[in-house]
């Protein structure tokens, strides 16, 4: 990924060079992207899948945040690409993030290639993960069939929380910027103007203000200049968190 003017884009030349490396047999693709909260366009998904097929690299598409696109568009699942590319694709989905069912371990792998699917099924059963537990199946069915109204309301809460965080920081703490995103509930926040490593900043905030957020260092690249803030919470908690963040930055500058 390339980061310019507060936006990320794919470094296509670098991606193809890596996919062409003989030892590379698989790549993990996050759609929507984690941590930047970006739902890839149909054109981007197709191009990535076609590059993987060209170099015979399996594309494992993690689409666990796919229900949480906050604009009118939906994600383009990797398994919807053209057939030649589809042979190299595995899409992973789960109700766990959207409907908070992670403890039930309910997840699915969509594998269009029959030979690959047979090999995956055998591996799943050998690893002891081939059969969902008793509660996972009815919970997943209920979430997908009866959770539409709840999800619609959740998305509106997330939109409002993102809008508040962006507007508050732009006005009160302009050194800290919430990147534009169109998916997920995790804000990717640029703190590079503070001149402080993200891990150190998060530790400082926790000690001085009680605000606990995540450092972006673990995502490598320029993650040391970013923090990640969970906005899937009541509005009053977002307001409180932004006030703590503001106070922390003000104290840092004094």
Image: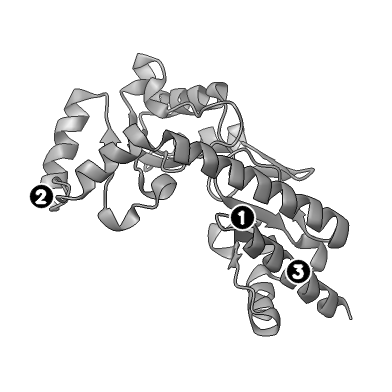
Q: Position of residue 214 (x, y in %)?
A: 58, 66
Whether residue 30 appears in this view of the structure is no
Name which residue lies at 66% across and 68% down: 198
Label number found at residue 243: 3
Question: Quadrant location of the C terminus?
Answer: bottom right
Q: What residue is pinned by disc 1?
A: 221
- Given this view, does label 3 or label 1 mark the residue nearer the observer? 3
- Given this view, does label 1 or label 2 mark the residue nearer the observer? 2
Q: Under tag 3, what secondary structure? A: helix
- Per the model, the C-alpha gap separating discs 1 and 2 is 36 Å
Q: Under tag 1, what secondary structure? A: loop
Pick the front one: 210 or 192: 210
- Name the N-terminal-most of marks 3 and 1: 1
- Name the N-terminal-most of marks 2 and 3: 2
Q: Is residue 52 above or below residue 96?
A: above
Tell me where residue 72 sits by quadrant.
top right
Q: Where is residue 80 in the image (x, y as percent from the top left)?
A: 40, 21
Tell me if mark 2 has few (under 14), some (14-19) or many (20+) residues whose alpha carbon lies within 10 angstroms of its own. few
Q: What residue is pinned by disc 2?
A: 126
């Amino acid at each position: 990924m390339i980061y310019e003017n507060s936006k990320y884009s794919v470094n296509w030349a670098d991606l193809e060079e890596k996919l062409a490396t003989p030892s590379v047999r698989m790549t993990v693709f996050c759609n929507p992207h984690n941590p930047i909260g970006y739902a890839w366009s149909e054109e981007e998904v197709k191009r990535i899948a076609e590059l993987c097929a060209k170099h015979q690299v399996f594309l494992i598409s993690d689409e666990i945040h796919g229900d949480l696109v906050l604009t009118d568009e939906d994600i383009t699942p990797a398994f919807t690409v053209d057939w030649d590319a589809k042979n190299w694709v595995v899409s992973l989905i789960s109700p766990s993030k959207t409907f908070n069912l992670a403890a039930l371990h309910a997840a699915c792998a969509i594998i269009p290639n029959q030979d690959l699917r047979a090999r995956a099924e055998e591996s799943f059963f050998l690893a002891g993960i081939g059969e969902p537990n008793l509660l996972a199946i009815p919970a997943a069915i209920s979430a997908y069939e009866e959770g539409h109204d709840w999800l619609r309301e959740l998305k509106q809460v997330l939109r409002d929380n993102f809008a508040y965080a962006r507007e508050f920081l732009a006005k009160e703490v302009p050194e800290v910027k919430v990147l534009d995103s169109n998916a997920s509930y995790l804000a990717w926040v640029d703190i590079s103007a503070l001149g402080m490593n993200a891990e150190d900043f998060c530790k400082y905030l926790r000690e001085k203000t009680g605000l606990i957020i995540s450092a972006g260092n673990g995502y490598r690249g320029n993650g040391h200049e970013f923090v990640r803030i969970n906005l899937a919470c009541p509005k009053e908690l977002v307001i409180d968190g932004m006030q703590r963040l503001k106070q922390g930055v003000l104290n840092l500058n004094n």
